[in-house]
Every structure is written in structure tokens, then in C-alpha cells.
Image: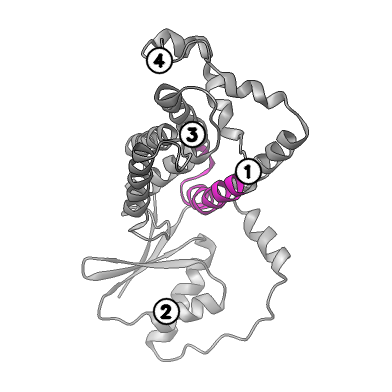
């Protein structure tokens, strides 16, 4: 789904009455300041004609307050929102189903022994990674070892994956899922050996992707999110250096995922944002 730039206004123009009207009408949008201008983006191109009409009516002082709407049932509203980003929803369901499988079976334990005989003696050998293979290196991405581990990673997945899928498409999200998971796990194996798991390498990769492209794509996340999370990453590395095992974090996966997310964001073309014809 492509975002559309529906109008441009000077910073001196107060758009808050119009944006309140848009929120009341449940129209997803974002106002971005760029230089001395305000850019109003819409998530759905089909909303553009009526938004332009409301803008003209507002300039003429004829924009009436919207009719109050009955609140939607919470579950129905959540499902409607979730189905707009089906790949993000499937990923979330996959993490939960894998966690349930881990609770009733021990077959996943072999996933923690990937390259056990090769580490640490051959961790600098390219052939060691080739011997382990792509699937064996990537599959620990699906493992979560506690409810809190699952909830924390799933929350970040839901926040970031839906924005990427909505604004960039499903293909970049798939690329991040597999590439950042693979590179993050390879770095983690090099850093600390086998016996690791979790999708946090992917979420760090998505964070790198969003942070790198935030000035060009309206993801609607705080600009300080990436610096704060990188600061937290450095803090946990420092804590585990002073007291080994204190945070039990997979630092290699986090660093590898973050860097691979940056690299993907740098080479992947930004999806075209359609520009509306109205300026103010």
C-alpha cells in the first residue's frame, strides 16, 4: 500500500482542525515538517479526494464537525487492522505456534546444537558456515525460551513489521525476516557459539531499516527510537562484559541483525510516494 502526499502547507498554517477531523473520521494520516513546510500524508489513496475537499471547506470556514460514530468492538477492530498486514500477522502466529510446539515436544533441542563440534576452533572458517547450512543457521530465529521472551520480541515485531509491510510492502519484510535472521544468527554463533534463539536479531534489523529510511518514509515512530535502542544495546553489552551472563542477551544476533538491516535499507529502493496536486 503506497502512502500519498495529499497536500503541502506552510508551517504558519494551523492544520490541527483538519487533522482532528481526519482522526474523527478514522482516516490514517501523518503530518511531517520539512523545512518551512508541513506535508500531509495519507495511508490510503482512496481517502485523498474527500480529504482535499475537506481541506478546501476548512479554508472557507465551512468544515462541519463529523457525525459521532459508535465505537467498534475491540476484537473486530483489531482483526480488521491486523488483516491489513497479513504477513505481519502470520509471523506473529508462527512465533506463538512455535512456542506451543516447544512446550509439548523436545525435537527443537537439536536446533540448539548447530555447529557444536565446529565452535570455537572453526568460527573463522567460511567452510564451517557452509557446513552448517542456511536452514540450520536461520531456524533458531523461531525459538523463544520463556513467555516474557516471546512477548517482548512479538511486541517489537508487531510494532515494526506492520509499518514496514504497510509502507514498503511484503517483499522487504520477508527479506528482513530471512536475511537479518540469518546474518544475526551467524554473528551470534561466531560470537558465543551454539545454543541461542529468538527473533530479536530480525527486530533489530527492522529497527535499522526504519531508522535509516525514517526521513523518507513516514513510519510514525519516534526519531529517537533508533538511538535509544542502540544505547540500550551498548549498555547490555557493557553489563555482560562486567558481569558475564547478567542480561542473557544475544549480543551477536542484535549487532548482526542491526547492521544487516542498515545494509538492506541502504540498497533497497524507497517505494514511490505519490504526490497530490494541492499546495497551501
Mark toward the start of the polypeptide (1 vs 4)? 4
Between disc 3 and disc 1, the foreground one is 1
- State the mark number for residue 55: 2
160 or 50, which is in the foreground? Answer: 160
Q: Give the quadrant of the C terminus.
A: bottom left
The residue beneath circle 1 is 146
Label 1 secondary element: loop
The first of marks 2 and 1 along the sequence is 2
| Dominant secondary structure of the residues highlighted in magenta in the image | helix
Q: CA distance from mark 1 to mark 4?
A: 28 Å
Instruction: Check residue 158 for magenta coloring.
Output: yes
- Residue 192: x %, y % from top left: 43, 26
Q: Which residue is mark 4?
A: 123
Quadrant housing residue 46: bottom right
Figure check: 22 above or below 67: above
Q: Are marks 2 and 1 in contact (CB under 8 Å)?
A: no
- Mark whose residue sits in front, 2 or 3: 3
User: Image height check: is 107 above or below 173?
Assistant: above
Q: Position of residue 29 (x, y in %)?
A: 46, 67
User: Are the residues flagged by discs 3 and 1 in contact, CB closer than 8 Å?
Assistant: no
Q: CA distance from mark 4 to mark 2?
A: 61 Å
Q: CA gap, disc 2 to disc 3?
A: 39 Å
Disc ID at residue 175: 3
Q: Where does the image place residue 177, in percent across and percent down from the top left?
A: 52, 36
Amino acid at each position: 500500500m503506497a502512502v500519498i502526499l495529499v497536500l503541502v502547507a506552510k508551517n504558519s498554517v494551523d492544520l490541527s482542525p483538519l487533522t482532528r477531523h481526519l482522526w474523527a473520521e478514522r482516516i490514517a494520516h501523518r503530518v511531517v515538517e520539512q523545512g518551512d513546510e508541513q506535508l500531509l500524508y495519507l495511508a490510503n489513496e482512496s481517502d485523498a479526494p474527500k480529504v482535499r475537499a475537506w481541506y478546501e471547506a476548512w479554508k472557507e470556514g465551512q468544515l462541519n464537525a463529523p457525525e459521532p460514530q459508535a465505537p467498534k468492538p475491540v476484537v473486530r477492530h483489531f482483526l480488521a487492522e491486523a488483516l491489513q498486514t497479513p504477513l505481519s500477522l502470520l509471523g506473529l502466529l508462527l512465533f506463538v505456534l512455535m512456542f506451543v510446539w516447544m512446550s509439548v515436544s523436545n525435537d527443537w533441542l537439536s536446533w540448539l546444537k548447530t555447529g557444536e563440534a565446529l565452535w570455537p576452533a572453526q568460527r573463522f572458517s567460511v567452510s564451517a558456515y557452509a557446513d552448517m547450512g542456511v536452514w540450520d543457521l536461520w531456524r533458531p530465529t523461531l525459538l523463544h525460551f520463556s513467555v516474557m521472551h516471546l512477548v517482548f520480541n512479538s511486541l517489537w515485531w508487531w510494532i515494526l513489521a506492520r509499518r514496514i509491510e504497510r509502507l514498503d510492502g511484503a517483499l522487504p519484510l520477508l527479506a528482513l525476516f530471512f536475511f537479518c535472521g540469518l546474518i544475526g544468527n551467524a554473528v551470534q554463533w561466531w560470537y558465543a557459539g551454539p545454543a541461542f534463539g529468538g527473533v530479536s536479531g530480525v527486530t533489530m534489523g527492522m529497527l535499522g531499516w526504519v531508522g535509516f529510511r525514517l526521513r523518507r518514509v513516514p513510519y510514525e515512530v519516534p526519531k529517537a527510537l533508533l538511538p535509544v535502542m542502540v544505547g540500550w544495546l551498548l549498555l547490555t553489552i557493557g553489563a555482560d562484559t562486567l558481569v558475564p551472563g547478567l542480561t542473557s542477551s544475544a549480543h551477536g544476533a542484535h549487532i548482526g541483525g542491526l547492521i544487516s538491516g542498515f545494509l538492506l535499507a541502504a540498497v533497497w529502493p524507497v517505494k514511490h510516494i505519490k504526490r497530490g496536486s494541492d499546495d497551501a
